[in-house]
């Protein structure tokens, strides 16, 4: 791709024949067609098909800076959005951005060094002192801490609110509310956000709706289709999918992403070439991974809901007593309710500890979205923050499960042997024999 390529399309390392061959005019779009099915586009995510010959796997451009014939050439390359210096964007990160923008139905995306980096940069780029944020009280604890502990120091106020309570949500707005933050499926409560309603209220107040889509992934839900303005991912989780990278991406309209990209050049949370390459490789298998994991998670949730050691299961795909909520889940998550679930043990936190120790196949690990199933306590507070308040999850008997690619019967057997073991021990299983059933109190379908 030459220097005069349209902004963002330039791969400075592409061979010269990419410019010259007779095929040059054949395809107006250098990328897999956007109208192809999502599965097809995922499989070839980020590929640039303009070159006559191209590596089937993109090279890793592990160079922090490019050399030019003269300063004018560098200026032209820079103006065209091509690679010059790593902090301003490099080809592997750009390919990842294109892929996520495509999958989320966004005009553009910006990739950074972590999911928290993507959230923080988005807020820093779009907020000023005196502004106000309305955020889900159910969202990831570090996102909450970012607002209450860090951005508050710069005069950004925030209100954490129960998004399921329309009155409380509407009442949380102030004349300076600029951004509303929600998670499609909340970490760790698994609440599904009513994105169409949230966007309507946010837009009426002149605010942007920023949705963290890490748990759902664009395979199950595309928040921009439901009224969101910006969608953010911890690509360290399902997009990357192998527990081997840390990255974050934010996608949305050109104008808002441009503002974020410009701020990123100054704040500098640059995504390294290798992590960008790994994230893009992970995305190519996202569709089958998510479909498989989601199906297994539904089977595991059903097993847990029927086990006498379990007091409550939080999984959006479980049947529940509220028809409006069930309709929302069908509307937002028509192809599956995801790989994440949480369940609470009837016998309390010590039993949760014992279960985590008893699991043979499922690893205790405080992350999610990889090929192997991981269990952990819900994130309760920022581990680095001594002054962090206790949350609703502190001292609870809830375990969060990220379902992987193992066979569902093997995972069910592992969980069952652990649950049976704690049932046999000395804890007080007050719920035993009368554990909650779908539609009853204590059995969550959120
Ligand atoms: C929903 C959600 N958003 C954002 C993040 C932050 O991502 P990262 O660890 O890549 O910074 C996490 C991390 O667990 C998460 O679960």
Image (cartoon, rainbow, N blue to C red):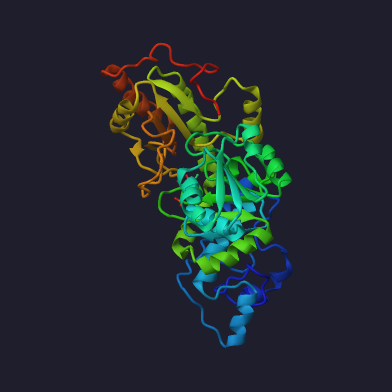
Relative placement, left or right, of 31 versus 269 is: right
Q: Please, which residue is most extreme toward the left here?
A: 426
Question: Can see residue 444?
Answer: yes
- Residue plotted at (56% across, 87% down): 69
> Which corner quadrant holds the C terminus?
top right
424 relative to 225, above or below: above
How many discs mark residues in the rendered view? Answer: 0
Residue 85 location in percent, x, y?
51, 74
66 relative to 261, above or below: below
17 relative to 427, above or below: below
Relative placement, left or right, of 138 versus 422 is: right
> Which corner quadrant holds the N terminus?
bottom right
318 relative to 252, above or below: above
Q: Please, which residue is most extreme toward the bottom here?
A: 70
Question: Can see residue 240?
Answer: no
Q: Nearer the viewer, residue 74 or 344?
A: 344
Q: Nearer the viewer, residue 201 or 304?
A: 201
Residue 245 location in percent, x, y?
43, 55
- Residue plotted at (57% across, 55% down): 123
- Residue plotted at (53% across, 61% down): 56
- Residue plotted at (65% across, 60% down): 31
Relative placement, left or right, of 60 versus 363 is: right
Residue 249 location in percent, x, y?
54, 55
Q: Nearer the viewer, residue 172 or 439?
A: 172
Residue 379 location in percent, x, y?
41, 40
């Amino acid at each position: 791709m030459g220097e005069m390529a349209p902004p963002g399309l330039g791969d400075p390392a592409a061979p010269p024949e990419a410019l010259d061959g007779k095929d040059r005019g054949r395809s107006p779009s250098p990328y897999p067609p956007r109208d192809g099915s999502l599965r097809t586009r995922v499989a070839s995510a980020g590929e640039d098909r303009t070159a006559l010959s191209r590596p089937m796997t993109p090279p890793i451009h592990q160079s922090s800076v490019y050399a030019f014939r003269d300063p004018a050439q560098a200026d032209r390359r820079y103006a065209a959005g091509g690679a010059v210096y790593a902090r301003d964007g490099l080809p592997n990160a750009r390919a990842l951005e294109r892929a996520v923008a495509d999958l989320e139905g966004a005009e553009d995306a910006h990739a950074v060094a972590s999911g928290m980096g993507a959230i923080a940069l988005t807020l820093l780029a779009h907020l000023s002192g005196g502004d106000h944020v309305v955020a889900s009280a159910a969202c990831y604890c570090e996102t909450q801490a970012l607002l209450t502990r860090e951005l508050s120091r710069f005069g950004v106020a925030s209100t954490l609110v129960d998004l399921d309570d329309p009155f409380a949500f509407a009442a949380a707005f102030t004349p300076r509310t600029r951004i509303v933050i929600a998670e499609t499926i909340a970490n760790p409560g698994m609440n599904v956000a009513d994105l169409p309603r949230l966007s309507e209220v946010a837009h009426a107040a002149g605010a942007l709706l920023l949705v963290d889509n890490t748990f759902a992934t664009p395979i199950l839900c595309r928040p921009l289709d439901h009224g969101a303005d910006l969608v953010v991912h911890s690509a360290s989780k399902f997009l990357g999918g192998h527990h081997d990278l840390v990255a974050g991406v934010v996608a949305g309209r050109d104008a808002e992403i441009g503002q974020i990209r410009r701020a990123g050049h100054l704040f500098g949370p640059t995504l390294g070439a290798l992590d960008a390459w790994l994230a893009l490789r992970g995305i190519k298998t996202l569709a089958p991974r998510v479909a498989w994991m989601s199906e297994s998670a539904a089977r595991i949730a059903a097993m847990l809901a029927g086990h006498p050691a379990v007091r409550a299961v939080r999984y959006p795909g479980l049947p529940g007593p509220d028809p409006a909520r069930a309709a929302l889940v069908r509307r937002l998550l028509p192809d599956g309710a995801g790989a994440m679930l949480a369940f609470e043990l009837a016998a309390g936190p010590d039993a949760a500890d014992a279960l985590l120790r008893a699991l043979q196949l499922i690893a205790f690990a405080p992350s999610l979205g990889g090929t192997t199933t991981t269990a952990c306590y819900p994130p309760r507070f920022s581990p680095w923050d001594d002054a962090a308040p206790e949350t609703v999850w502190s001292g609870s008997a809830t375990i969060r499960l990220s379902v992987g690619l193992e066979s569902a019967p093997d995972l069910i057997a592992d969980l069952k042997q652990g649950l049976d073991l704690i049932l046999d021990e000395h804890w007080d299983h007050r719920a035993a024999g009368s554990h909650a059933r779908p539609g009853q109190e204590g059995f969550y379908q959120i």
